[in-house]
Image (cartoon, rainbow, N blue to C red):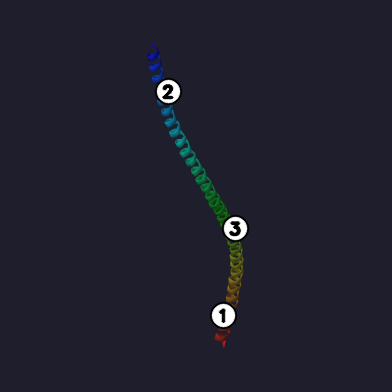
Amino acid sequence: QLQNTLKCDREISAKITRQTASDQEVIAFLDERVQELERTVEKLNADQATAGKSVEKIKFSSERQVAVLSDMLAYEREQKVDQEKEWRSTKKLLVKEVKHCRAQIMTLEAERDGFRQEYDRL
């Protein structure tokens, strides 16, 4: 019986040793996997930080472009308003000039007709 107990204890000890070795392999595999995942997380965090900086640069650049374009649009609108004012002023002046010229033509035509009548009398 002592031998059976000893044999049983050895089998139990061997099983425990195998289980411990198996557990050690699993632990080693899991540790390696955790380290791999941690490296992946670090890489992803670095990529995310780089992407964030890139987005900020693009955002800043776009905001500057929008500001420049807004300024250009405001300037062009002011130019348009100024040109319209100038156009109206010029048109008004030309209308006055045309009226004056027409009046002068009528005066000259009347004068011509007068001279013609006087010439015809002579």
Amino acid tagged 2: Ile
Disc 2 to disc 1, how far (Cα)?
139 Å
Residue at 59 percent across and 70 percent down: it is 94
**Mark 2 Cα shell of 10 Å, populated few (<14), some (14-19), many (≥20):** few
Closest to the observer: 17 or 86?
17
Closest to the observer: 85 or 111?
85
Closest to the observer: 65 or 24?
24
* Nearer mark to the viewer, of 3 and 2: 2
Write down the residue under mark 2.
16
Residue at 51 percent across and 45 percent down: it is 48
Q: Where is residue 113 in the image (x, y as percent from the top left)?
A: 56, 80
Could you say whether the residue bearing mark 2 is in a helix, strand or loop? Answer: helix
Write down the residue under mark 3.
71
Q: Position of residue 22 (x, y in %)?
A: 41, 28
Could you say whether the residue bearing mark 1 is in a helix, strand or loop? Answer: helix
Left or right: residue 45 compared with residue 26: right
Q: In which quarter of the image is the C terminus?
A: bottom right
The residue sitting at the top extreme is 1
Residue 113's disc is: 1
* Residue 6 sits above or below residue 87 on the image: above
Q: In which quarter of the image is the N terminus?
A: top left
